[in-house]
Image (tube, rainbow, N blue to C red):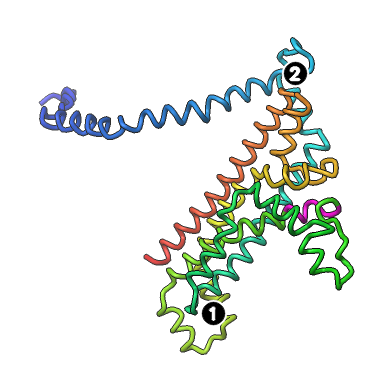
Amino acid sequence: MSATAAAPAPQRPAPAARTAKRTERARGWSLRAPLLPALIFTILVTQLPFLFTIYYSLQSWNLVRPGSGSFTGLANYAAVLTDAQFLGAALNTVVITASCVLLSMAVGIGLAMLLDRKFAGRGVVRTLLITPFLIIPVATALLWKTTMFDPVFGLIGFVLTPFGLGDVDWVSQFPVVSVVTALVWQWSPFMMLLVLAGLQSQGDDVIEAGQVDGASKWQMFTNITLPHLRRYIELGVLLGSIYVVNTFDTIYMMTQGGPGTASANLPFYIYQRTFLGFDIGQSAAMGVVVVIGTIAVAMLALRLIFRTFMSDQEANS
């Protein structure tokens, strides 16, 4: 036998194995084929407009000056990131979103704890508490602006008259507080439903064990209930932030972003630059910046939630 023996020829897969692979591949395509129209439609209605927005953001285009469109590169982004009003609107967006989500979650946890116990008429009370989330945002904004915050006929002024605050024009003097109050009233039922689902998934044996060990109600809430609700709270904060950061109708109906731009968030400020200032280039650049920032925050939050979920799975296994 020679030392330089020829290497063995690679073995070809058997015909039956090749046929099985082709069959499996064809079956996979047959399962994915019905989803292709939906995928194409999603790409057309989401990614194509975003690509046009990126294109417009690289142009100097103002509708007040016809024929002024020209390629400017990243000049619009530089102008946006140094715009004091844009940075103020970004700060308002963070304040409104964080305040609304945190306060809504706190109110939702309190309401869910009350509804997690049996009492007469619990179904009716639950339905009534869900009602604010079912009202369209425009109606909610008008309700709070005219019925609650009106300095002459508002219920808030009537209740606060004994304290010397009956003639305060809340919408004009405290626009951000007014907007956050209306949003908290609207989003608290959503947080309540998520937390209530988490409470009802909690095992009775854990609660009974805590009661047997002599834990107080506060200790049971902080050491047993709250850790169990962590995933539900994180999910509520994530979903609430994604929706609240895009708030437009409440601000438009209550404050018009005023006084000046004191209560304008990023969606409303972009609307002002587009439909009132007619600056297509800079408003498109603002939109791209907002989308990138929202995606970055959402990806970070999803990673944190996924990491928490995986750690809980490992602890339970």
Q: Is residue 166 left or right of residue 55?
A: right
> Residue 245, image x and y in percent?
65, 46
- Residue annotated with mark 1: 220
Tell me the quarter of the picture where residue 200 sits: bottom left
Q: Amino acid at mark 2?
A: Leu
For marks 2 and 1, the one nearer the N-term is 2
The kind of residue on which mark 1 rests is Met
- Which quarter of the picture shows residue 101? bottom right
Residue 18 is left or right of residue 128, and the answer is left
Q: Image quadrant for the C terminus?
A: bottom left
Q: Tell us which disc is closer to us: 2 or 1.
A: 2
Q: Position of residue 202 (x, y in %)?
A: 44, 71
The overriding secondary structure of the stretch rendered in magenta is helix
Instruction: Write the residue at 56% across / 51% down.
Output: 239
Q: What secondary structure is found at the residue carrying circle 2?
A: loop
Label 1 environment density (alpha carbons within 10 Å; few <14, some 14–19, many ≥20):
some
Q: Residue at x 57, y 61 (%)?
A: 189
* Of the pair 133 and 145, the residue shown nearer to us: 145
Q: Residue shown at 68%/23% (left/top)? A: 57
Where are the magenta residues, as a range? 173-179
Q: Which residue is mark 2?
A: 63
Local crowd at mark 2 within 10 Å, few (<14), some, or many (≥20)? some
